[in-house]
């Protein structure tokens, strides 16, 4: 099976599973899944977040997702428990479609590592 077909199938499986668990079956989009990963990485799942905190959660998720690709490296946790990352390598300029594929691949790999999907 080609890598693209496998990624597409795993992505669809992941979206369906997360959507059923977190949005009563209404399909979550890429940003919503990134947000969920940020909440997971922060570890404070049972609280409300302000708008600026939601953006920070998405930033945490993106750093965590792109860490295995060598773009970010975990640095430290601050006094409130928020993780901080440092840039190791600048992201290449990618077209919108290429960015989407990279993020979907990183998200699928994240959930494979967590054994949430197979």
Image (spheres, rainbow, N blue to C red):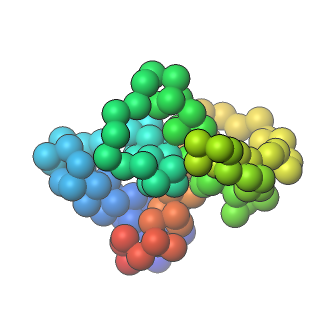
Direction right: furthest residue: 89
Q: Residue at x 53, y 38 (%)?
A: 58
Q: Which is nearer the eye, 17 or 37?
A: 37
Q: For this view, does 77 lie left or right of residue 53?
A: right
Q: Image quadrant for the C terminus?
A: bottom left
Point out residue 1 in the picture as x, y percentages from the top left corner. Answer: 46, 77
Q: For this view, does 36 lie left or right of residue 41?
A: left
Point out residue 4 in the picture as x, y percentages from the top left corner. Answer: 51, 62
Q: For this view, does 4 lie left or right of residue 30?
A: right
Direction left: furthest residue: 24
Callout count: 0
Direction front: furthest residue: 79
Q: Residue at x 30, y 63 (%)?
A: 13
Task: Give the vertical position of 111 relative to 53 (above or below).
Answer: below
Task: Give the vertical position of 110 relative to 29 (above or below).
Answer: below
Q: Residue at x 15, y 48 (%)?
A: 25
Q: Which is nearer the eye, 1 or 85?
A: 85
Q: Which is nearer the eye, 32 or 97?
A: 32
- Residue 77 in sight here: yes
Point out residue 26 in the picture as x, y percentages from the top left corner. Answer: 18, 41
Q: Residue at x 41, y 76 (%)?
A: 115
- Residue 5 in sight here: no
Direction top: furthest residue: 51
Q: Which is nearer the eye, 51 or 96?
A: 51
Q: For this view, does 93 lie left or right of residue 48?
A: right
Task: Give the vertical position of 34 relative to 52 (above or below).
Answer: below
């Amino acid at each position: 099976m080609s890598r693209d077909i496998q990624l597409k199938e795993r992505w669809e499986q992941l979206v369906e599973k997360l959507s059923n668990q977190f949005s009563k079956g209404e399909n979550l989009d890429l940003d919503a899944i990134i947000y969920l990963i940020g909440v997971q990485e922060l570890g404070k799942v049972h609280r409300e977040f302000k708008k600026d905190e939601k953006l920070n959660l998405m930033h945490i998720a993106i750093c965590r997702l792109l860490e295995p690709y060598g773009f970010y490296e975990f640095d430290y946790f601050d006094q409130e428990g928020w993780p901080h990352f440092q840039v190791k390598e600048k992201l290449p300029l990618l077209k919108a479609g290429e960015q989407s594929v990279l993020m979907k691949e990183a998200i699928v790999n994240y959930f494979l590592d967590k054994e949430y999907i197979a």
